[in-house]
Image: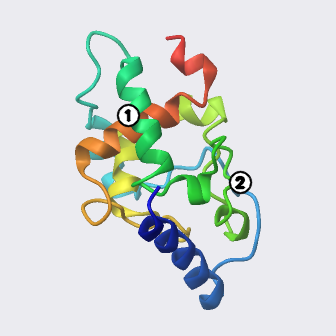
Amino acid sequence: MNQTMRVCGMLTAALFLASGLALAGPERDPLKPRVPADQRAAAKKLKSPFYKNSKKASDEIVAEGKKLYEGKGTCVNCHGKKGDGQGPAGKVLNPGPRNFTNCKFHKKRKDGELFWVIKNGSPGTGMVPLIPATISEEEAWKIIAYERSFCKKWRKK
């Protein structure tokens, strides 16, 4: 990860601390949708361009997603290297970031919902919009494929 991205991630966390939005705490309700109700149906219909006759992306796409998650996408700052929501910035956010190791979360949320949040951010949380300022739509889909890999059951589908 280059120095600029690292600084941006830490500045984001600092802004939330300074604004009073961040008081360390776990994710309140890991199964609660973060897409507004009036946009959820449309978001659920969005499909990853990387699924070929299956519900999972190729190992190559997952590997590219990991690089983006840990680098350009800056996801690791909040969601952590293990995907458990315990990244350095994530530890100070309230509610805490999504815990991608929670398989119940993966079963409940569609890829399109995850994409919507990456693109639009998540009101009431520290999740800011990443598309197009930080990553492209194609890169977001790759990150989602990697996020899904934190649930071992998901990768076996």
Quadrant in the picture for residue 27: bottom right
Quadrant in the picture for residue 19: bottom right
Residue type indicated by callout 1: Glu
Left-right relation of 82 to 68: right
Quadrant in the picture for residue 104: top right
Is residue 89 among what the camera can see? yes
Q: Residue at x 33, y 45 (%)?
A: 140
Q: Residue 8 carries which label?
A: none
Residue 139, horizontal then vertical, whole percent: 30, 44
Left-right relation of 49 to 58: left
Asked whether the residues under the numbered discs 2 and 1 touch, taking CB atoms below 8 Å apart as contact, a structural biologist would say: no
Circle 2: element type: loop
- Dot 1 crowding, Cα within 10 Å, few <14, some 14–19, many 20+: some
Left-right relation of 80 to 50: right
Circle 1: element type: helix
Residue type indicated by callout 2: Gln
Residue 94, horizontal then vertical, whole percent: 68, 69
Colouring chosen for the image of the structure = rainbow
Which residue matches tag 2? 86
Which residue matches tag 1? 64
Seen from the viewer's position, the closer of residues 156 and 3 is 3
Q: Nearer the viewer, mark 2 or mark 1?
A: 1
Seen from the viewer's position, the closer of residues 102 and 14 is 14
| Total numbered labels placed on residues in the image | 2
Q: Which residue is drawn at 67% across and 35% down?
A: 102
Residue 103, horizontal then vertical, whole percent: 63, 29
